[in-house]
Image (spheres, coloured by chain):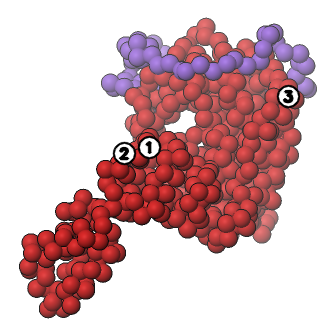
Amino acid sequence: MVKIGLEIHGYLLTKEKLFCKCLSVHGKKYTEPNINICPICTGQPGSKPLLPNEEAVKKLIQIALVLKCTINKSVFWQRKHYSWPDLPKGFQSTVSGPYAIPNGVNGKFMEIRIRECHLEEDPAAWNPLTGEIDYNRSGAPLVEIVTEPDFKSSEEVIDWIKNLIAALGYVKAIDKQSGIKADVNVSIKGGKKIELKNINSTRKIKEAIEIEIARQKKDIPKEEQTRMYDENDRVTKLMRTKENAIDYRFIKEVDLPYLNVDLKLINDLKKQIPELPQERLKRIIKDYKIDKKTASILTKEIEIVDLFEKVCKKVGVKLALIWVLQEFLSVVNYNKMSVSDFNINPEHFIELLQAIKDNKITESKAQEILRKWVPDSFSPKDEINKNIKISKEELNKFIEQAIKENPKAVEDYKKGFKGAINFLVGSVMKNSNKRADFKLTKEMLEKKLK
Amino acid sequence: MISEKERKQIETESKKLLEKFARKLWEIKGLPKESMIIRDKSMRKEENGCSDKELKKRMLANAKNKNDDFIIAKEKSW
């Protein structure tokens, strides 16, 4: 019998850090190291924290509501002490610890019980290989979600985490770019609990759990330990015997007042929570008669499903599905961006698809317009008017031209190399500036070359 | 200058002190119920966030071990 519990850390989506006015932007990909810093988040002597960032508190409460937690209206901050180069002031300010009243308690998400979820600040980023410390991350607001040990397998864990990330994406509470970090507690019957620290991707979480279960089955743990997952050697390695709360010397944070949230704020935040992925999935399947697999892809991100629902009301389910799920997502992936990086006005999308439906422009031309909507869409009206689909008569002229200009391809086709026709279609597309209908061009060419 | 032996001894003694302190702290039953600091509000409104390249320069100027962008803290040498 395996029991698995999770402690998940996610970065809250805020502009500023938790206790100072520094930009909450970190990571080499996004900013220069050590520039989003101030005396507060670098723990300079004499510096005191500002009051906590309200936006971080609101996001935290929304997460707690999504997880169906009871919200504690008055909580206090604690200092969690440890000595490490990632923690310049020597303690972390957190709403967790032995005396804590966490922000949210006793929740449930997809049948997994949530023990608590609370707010805390992140330490700096310390690279153990180079020793480099990046304080951009120091003080960034984090949510920690602690589950009961209700999971029984790695598959169950991964499925749950994916659904959790999707749900939190709907309330735009966590920074998906920064990802999540998880501590995973694994125990088997008769053995002590082992904590696997700081695993930062779902793939690694799955691997680490499976490898740790296999290890424990061979050698049942007799003491609690903290271990790390080494993905190169595919083993978990002992870091230390488990620290107790006593080692962290928790005390009340003397520089911060109680964190109070009133019922009105909680109710306002509750009203802002949209229909969540699980419910939306069921409704989408029912309302639009689409299969579960397609509906699952649609509901993975709120921006996609919102766009689909707005567009399909005007142009129909079939066209909307193809253009939202295939064409739009291929533009997103090609640009290595995420859906939320795009500012797509659904009205522009509807105009574009209506033009295809009305046979005004070709699909190739529409794809070209779509590719220009990075990152902001614009009305496609002018582009459509400039690129009206050519008539059958005009198409015939382009086909004649393609046959004349490409005798080798014609000869190859007639010899039986059927693929040669694609070259001729491509030539028509090029000469007509993609205003020729692809399917019709191919049909007419085949007829002519018989 | 202290010898390596003395350094080790100080390290061991300070660790013992810290552990003793941690245990004493743990034995305290309950925490003061009132807040230790009084403010009209318990949160601040977020603005747009800011950066400070000057502080980076000053921090690096004072750092013992560093490269162009980072203070360096190698394990067991801080």
Give the label, 3 or 2, closer to the camera: 2
Q: Residue at x 14, y 91 (%)?
A: A415
Q: Residues within 10 Å of mark 3 (few under 14, many from 20)?
A: few
**Chain in purple (letter):** B
Residue type at mark 3 is Lys
Respond whether the residues carrying marks 3 and 2 are from the same subunit: yes
Structural distance between the alpha carbons of marks 2 and 1: 8 Å
Residue B17 seen in this snapshot: no
- Front residue of A1 and A72: A72
**Chain in red (letter):** A
Which structural element holds mark 2? helix
Q: Which mark is residue A379?
A: 1
Q: Residues within 10 Å of mark 2 (few under 14, many from 20)?
A: few
- Front residue of A110 and A304: A304
Left or right: where A201 falls relative to A31: right
Q: Residue at x 8, y 79 (%)?
A: A407
Which structural element holds mark 1? loop
Structural distance between the alpha carbons of marks 3 and 2: 48 Å
Q: Which residue is mark 2?
A: A382
Q: Which mark is residue A391?
A: none
Position of residue A432 measured from the top left corner of the image (x, y, whole percent): 23, 62
Residue type at mark 1 is Ser
Q: Which mark is residue A264?
A: 3
Give the chain of mark 3.
Answer: A
Left or right: where A10 falls relative to A231: right
